[in-house]
Image (cartoon, rainbow, N blue to C red):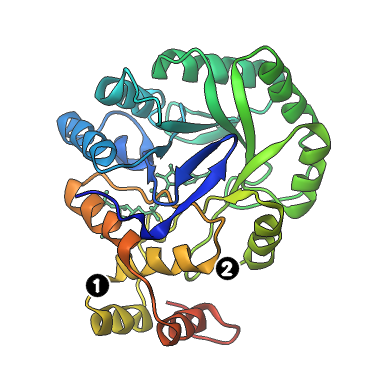
Amino acid sequence: MQISDRAGTFALGDRTVKRMGYGAMQLAGPGVFGPPKDPAAAIAVLREAVASGIDHIDTSDFYGPHVTNQIIREALHPYPPHLTIVTKVSARRGADGSWIPAMSPAELTQAVHDNLRNLRLDVLEVVNLRSMFDVHGPAEGSLEEPLTALADLQRQGLIRHIGLSNVTPTQIREGRRICEIVCVQNQYNLAQRADDALIDALARDGTAYVPFFPLGGFTPLQSSALSAVADRLGHTPMQVALAWLLRRAPNILLIPGTSSVAHLRENLGAARIELPDDAMTKLDAIAAPGACRP
Ligand SMILES: NC(=O)c1ccc[n+]([C@@H]2O[C@H](COP(=O)([O-])OP(=O)(O)OC[C@H]3O[C@@H](n4cnc5c(N)ncnc54)[C@H](OP(=O)(O)O)[C@@H]3O)[C@@H](O)[C@H]2O)c1
C-alpha cells in the first residue's frame, strides 16, 4: 500500500518529507532494551515502511542501545537518497535498561559517532538534542553547552541539521541563538496537549513539530469519544488519532511507532483520512479543560 498524498509534505531541514513517517523505537526489545524477539519481523516492518513511500524515519542509538540503528542499517542500507533518518542524542542506557543523562560534549561526540557507525552514514541528516533535565517531560535548564557541542560537530560536517526534543519554549529561544533549530520533538497527542500554543508558534515560523507518543506511547490511547468517532467514520481509533494530528497543524510530522506490519499498514491508512469538522470538535473536546481524561 502506498501512502496517500492527501496528508502532504513539510520542510525538515533543507529537505521536504511526507507528513506520515515512522518511529523506530518499538523495534528494540521490551523496554526499548536489547534485541527484539523477532529480528526478521523488525526488518520486515522497516522494508514495508520504505516500500510504502515513507521517507522519514526517527531513531536513536540509545534504543537497544545500538540495536535499533543496526536493524535499520541491515534492513535499508544502502539507503534510498530520498530517505531522511533523524536521530537523537543525550542519553545512555544503564546495565538495567535505565535512561541516564549523557549531555556532556564528550558524551555527545561519542553518541554522534555511535550513530554514524551503527547506521553506516558519513553524515547525520538531523540530530535532535533530547533535553534530560527531567527524563519524563520538558524542564527548564540551559542547553547552551550541549547545543554548542552539537553545533561544533555540525561545523565539522558530521551533522547537517539540528533539532530539539523534550524542551520548553525558553529552551527553543535559547537554542535559536546558538544554531538553526529545524524541528522540535515533544510529547503530544489527542490527550496530551501541553504544546498547543508552541505548535502554532512553530507553524508560524515554518519549523516542523514532531510529536512523540502520537498514539499514547507505551499505553496506547483509549477513549470512548475517540472510539465513537472512529466507529462512525469506519476507521480505527489509532487511525483517527493520527488523522487528528495531521489536521491539527500543517507543521506536524508523524512518526507513529510499531513493531508490526499490520499496525504499520493501519497507521499509514490515516494519511488518506480527512476528518470532518464535527469529528474534530468531538476529538478536541477529549483534552478540553474539565473533560474526562481518556
Ligand atoms: N524524543 C523522545 O524523547 C521520544 C520519546 C519516545 C518516542 N520517541 C519517538 O517517537 C516515536 C513514536 O513513539 P512511540 O513509538 O513510543 O509511541 P506511539 O507511536 O504513540 O505508540 C506506539 C505503541 O502503540 C502500538 N501501536 C502502534 N500502532 C498501533 C495500531 N495501529 N493499533 C494498536 N496499537 C498500535 C505499538 O505497539 P505494536 O508494536 O504492537 O504496534 C506501541 O505499543 C518512537 O518510535 C520514537 O522514534 C521519541
Q: Residues within 10 Å of mark 1 (few under 14, many from 20)?
A: some
What residue type is disc 2 on?
Arg
211 left or right of 101 in image = left
Give x and y (percent) for residue 213: 45, 55
Looking at this view, is 260 or 105 the one in front?
Answer: 260
Q: Mark 2 points at which residue?
A: 193
Quadrant where the C terminus sits is bottom left
Q: Name the residue under label 1.
A: 235
Residue drawn at the location 29% of the way across and 77% of the way down: 230
What residue type is disc 1 on?
His
Residue drawn at the location 57% of the way across and 68% of the way down: 193
Q: Name above or below for residue 273 compared with residue 70.
A: below
Looking at this view, is 68 or 47 the one in front?
Answer: 47
Is residue 184 something one can see in this rendering?
yes
Q: Residues within 10 Å of mark 2 (few under 14, many from 20)?
A: some
Is residue 132 something one can see in this rendering?
no
Of badges 1 and 2, nearer the viewer stands 1
- Occupied quadrant, residue 158: top right
Give x and y (percent) for residue 256: 38, 51
**Element marked by disc 2:** loop
- Occupied quadrant, residue 153: top right
Q: Name above or below for residue 273 compared with residue 269.
A: below
**CB contact under 8 Å: marks 1 and 2:** no
Give x and y (percent) for residue 286: 47, 80
Which disc is residue 48 wearing?
none
Residue drawn at the location 66% of the way across and 51% of the way down: 206
**Element marked by disc 1:** loop
